Amino acid sequence: MTRIAGPAVLAVLLAAVVMAAPPPPGVPRGDPASLIDRVRAVGAEGKGNDDASAAWKQLVGLGTEALLPTLAAITDGDPVANNWLRSAVDAVAEKTLREKRSLPVKELESFLKDRKHSGVARRLAYEWLCRVDDKAPDRLLPDMLDDPGSELRRDAVAVVIKDGDDCLKENDKDGAITAYRKAFESARDVDQVDLLAQKLDKLGVKVDVTAHYGCVLHWKLIGPFDNAGGVGFQAVYPPEKGVELTKSYKGKGGAEVKWVDHVADNPRGLVNLNKVYPGMLKGTAGYAYAVIESPREQKVQLRAGSKNAVKVFLNGKQVFARDEYHHTVTMLDNHVAFGTLKPGRNELLVKVCQNEQNEAWTKEWEFQLRLCDELGGGVPFKVVTPGAGDTEKKERN
């Protein structure tokens, strides 16, 4: 999910610049929809700024009439346009309160509860509700533990964590365990999940972080193949034609390569290919293969994390590809693909390419892959990759 960078600072700066610029003469007042379209047409590096500035000022001038339509126009993508729209919402709300008038509280709450709107927009509506109604968190957060927007679910989880902490203060161990388990089931942010795992461990309760996220730990790996000049990303090396674990092939420089077992040494399944193929290799490509069994047909999201160019295949079909290098810090869910697990046996194949940059921050050659539902919770499966201990039973009920 795209997050808006520095929204408070950006909103203030943007509002100051735009309000200082008068709209072009003869421009009609306009309706919210047409003005929003003009604001959303703004591009990177200043493209369309003049018209967007004029439309933004007119939009803010409409007052609370523009509040809900502008919120609804904020998406989970397009951060440039989102910054303009968010600043318009803030400017309207600030002006309304400064003039001692009321925000449309019921409408904002209805907007917040409608999960078809983007997470960032609903979070913004929630923040303004909390500004004018200090009872809003107690009323709204209990129903947001399963919220699709991580921005709101995080706050809901934090409330339940506090409930558990309060139970501990009263020496109510069972109550604390119940609260922490409830919070753990809903938590998705790494810091909250780790905190809850630690709290439960201290109370004698073990939780499975790997199954919670649906991470795949056991793999068969093969490489390195050639990616000099970036040729490896489009090249179809033997594993893409069909995995035969007993065969070896010619890899980079003509060296023989064969499949080897690998188990990720952390619960979120980060596979460090530099440990498997030492020497900080550059201009290379490698593959990871896993066989899993699904208890039923189920739609899944295949969420991958990697700084490198990556392709993901499910049952021989490519479901994701990104030919980009060192674009972000490796973390869960850099990339999201969609697929359907068949009942029984399913095959996963991941291709990870490393380029030839030599800066210190380009050394990592690694990936993560997890299988989850639309809310980011791990789906039930077990890994049965041949040779990886033959059967790894990591089931999530």
Image (spheres, rainbow, N blue to C red):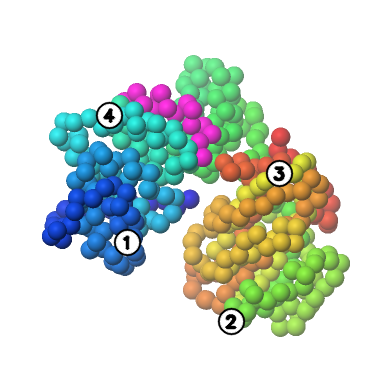
Depth check: 55 or 297 in front?
55
Kindly identify which residue carries mark 4: 132
- Give the side of residue 322 with respect to residue 96, left or right: right
Residue at x 21% of width, y 43% of height: 62
Label 4 crowd (10 A; few <14 / some 14-19 / many >=20): few
- Mark 1 lies on a secondary structure that is loop
- Mark 4 lies on a secondary structure that is helix
- Give the side of residue 119 with respect to residue 218, left or right: left
Mark positioned earlier in the residue sequence (1 or 4): 1
Work out whether 235 lies above or below 83: below
Mark positioned earlier in the residue sequence (1 or 3): 1
Depth check: 205 or 181 in front?
181
Kindly identify which residue carries mark 2: 229
Look at discs 1 and 4 and give the one toward the viewer.
1
- Mark 2 lies on a secondary structure that is helix
Kindly identify which residue carries mark 1: 42
